[in-house]
Image: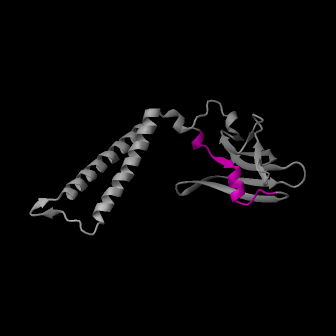
Amino acid sequence: MIDQLIRISISDLLRLKMLGTNTHATRIISWKGGYSKFGSVTLVVNTRGDNSYIEFSYTVKSQEIRERFELLPVISHLKKGVVWYMRCNRSGSSCKKLYLNGTHFVGRKAIVNGLYSKQICSKKYKHGIVRDIQSLKIIDGEISKVKNSKYFIQYFAERPTKKYLKLLANIKKRKQLEERLQMSIAVKN
């Protein structure tokens, strides 16, 4: 699954303030799984001069790997600044994200049979989950609206009120939706 691979994107570099015109920056990025660090990469970004590049230095299976990717500045279609791309060494295509596939960083086009997890799910499954989540939000809104109303009473003349019965029905419906969502997520995993 492509969305489970370690990735570095242009937006990450911009957020870290490593990318700009005429800059040279170095930073170490670490990935954590739970409470332990399981990987890190040293990034060197150089946009000085004509050949801009980004260099990755990391270790995989006790093998030191150093890769250099060309950075391509493209003038934005709005003529307001520059849009940056990285050129994948394997496919030669421009991309905004590089994925660690095995031992090397590559663009999405270089990953053979690479799919996102949402592409594997059926359309019926995806729409069912979305519909259930939207229903949960609506029911939660109705429940909180009734519970927080100023004049809400559960019983009148020793009989349950219509609002209270509707609230109980919504709570029951919510529990059923939660169970169905948990079952569908468990089936997916």
Counting from the top left corner in percent of width and height, residue 178 is at 34, 48
Determine the image quadrant of residue 12: bottom right
Check the image and report above or below for 104 versus 138. above
Asked if residue 18 lies in the magenta stretch, the reply is: yes
User: Which residue is situated farthest in the top direction here?
Assistant: 113
Task: Check the picture and name the quadrant holding the N terminus.
Answer: top right
Residue under the image location 27 percent in, 52 percent down = 170
Between residue 96 and residue 159, name the one nearer to us.
159
Point out residue 164 in the picture as x, y percentages from the top left corner. 21, 58
Most distant residue in the right direction: 49
Chain part drawn in magenta: 2-20
Q: Nearer the viewer, residue 67 or 16?
A: 16
162 vs 5, nearest the viewer:
162
- Looking at the image, can residue 62 be seen? no
Left or right: residue 76 versus residue 164 is right
Q: Which residue appears at 52% of the width and 38% of the height? A: 118
Whether residue 12 is in magenta: the answer is yes
Residue 66: % across, % down: 77, 46
* Residue at figure coordinates x 66%, y 43% from the top left: 100
Residue 167 visible in the picture: yes
x, y percent for residue 20: 79, 57
Q: How many marks?
A: 0
For the point 41% across and 48% down, the residue is 134
Front residue of 66 and 158: 158
